[in-house]
Amino acid sequence: MRIASIIDISLVDVPGIPVTVIFTGGCNFDCPYCQNAEIIPRISGTEMAIQDIVERSTGNLVDGFCITGGEPTIHGDLPDLLRALKSTGLHVNLNTQGSVPSVLEKCLPFLDSVWFDIKAPSETYLRISRTSTNPWNQIVESMKLLLSSEVAFWPRTTFTRSLLSPSDISTIMLVLEGMGFQGEYVIQNYVASAGVRPSEKAHLKVPDISEIESVKDNVPAGIDVRLEWR
């Protein structure tokens, strides 16, 4: 597996749990607002054996692990890494956009929680993922897998006014409702961080929270919207 970096301790990646964060290299999406754009190329990072990743990631004063990227599920040996981390008895969290359900399914026995990044409604997914074909069917399959599992499913969307509208967010909430989801749905703002490519920053606008607050007027029953402006 290719590893871009490992952060020993983070207090912000998993709510209420200090974690070691493992960044895998490579992604099959090319989202314009990506804050880790330098690790999108498949050749990003360094090839590491599972045992070496575990040895590098354990021994910190944490209560869990967060595996993010890039997109971790493009690595076929991800379940092996998660199995090894789960054997420590600590919380294991995965960040994914859900485009590789075949790998995600094999990961479920070793996961406690998943941050699931829903990029857009189905008809506008290509605008953000910038993939050769629309991955929506795979996204839906991954959400169904999580919703039928014991893993905590935490959906979220990054709101960038030049790419999404409030009605797009409302459509995503209706999709979640139709799939039987109940719980918190996080909408976070696009941040023009140092990791975003300068060529993309020129076309992206950091949104004001007032641009999205209207979605809270028509939230489906059972869904709690949290606006996380950073």
Image (cartoon, rainbow, N blue to C red):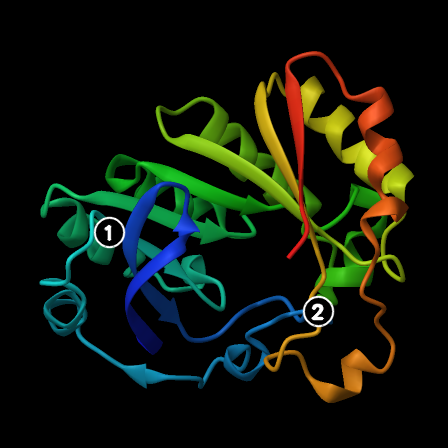
Q: Residue 166, percent across and down?
A: 88, 41
Of residues 81 and 12, which is closer to you in this image?
A: 12
Q: Residue 31, percent across and down?
A: 69, 67
Q: Which quadrant: the N terminus?
A: bottom left
Q: Amino acid at mark 2?
A: Tyr
SS type, badge 1: helix
Residue at left offset 85%, top offset 82%: 202
Residue identifier under label 2: 33
**Marks 2/1: CA distance?**
28 Å
Q: Is residue 44 visible?
A: yes
Of residues 225 and 209, which is closer to you in this image?
A: 209
SS type, badge 2: loop
Of residues 224 and 42, which is closer to you in this image?
A: 224
In this picture, is 201 found above or below 140? Answer: below
Using a 10 Å C-alpha cutoff, classify the residue at mark 1 as few (fewer than 14 neighbours), some (14 to 19) or many (20 or more): many
Residue identifier under label 1: 82
Q: Earlier in the sequence, mark 2 or mark 1?
A: 2
Q: Residue 217, percent across and down?
A: 86, 23
Q: Residue 33, percent across and down?
A: 71, 69
Residue at left offset 63%, top offset 66%: 29
In this picture, is 83 found above or below 7? Answer: above
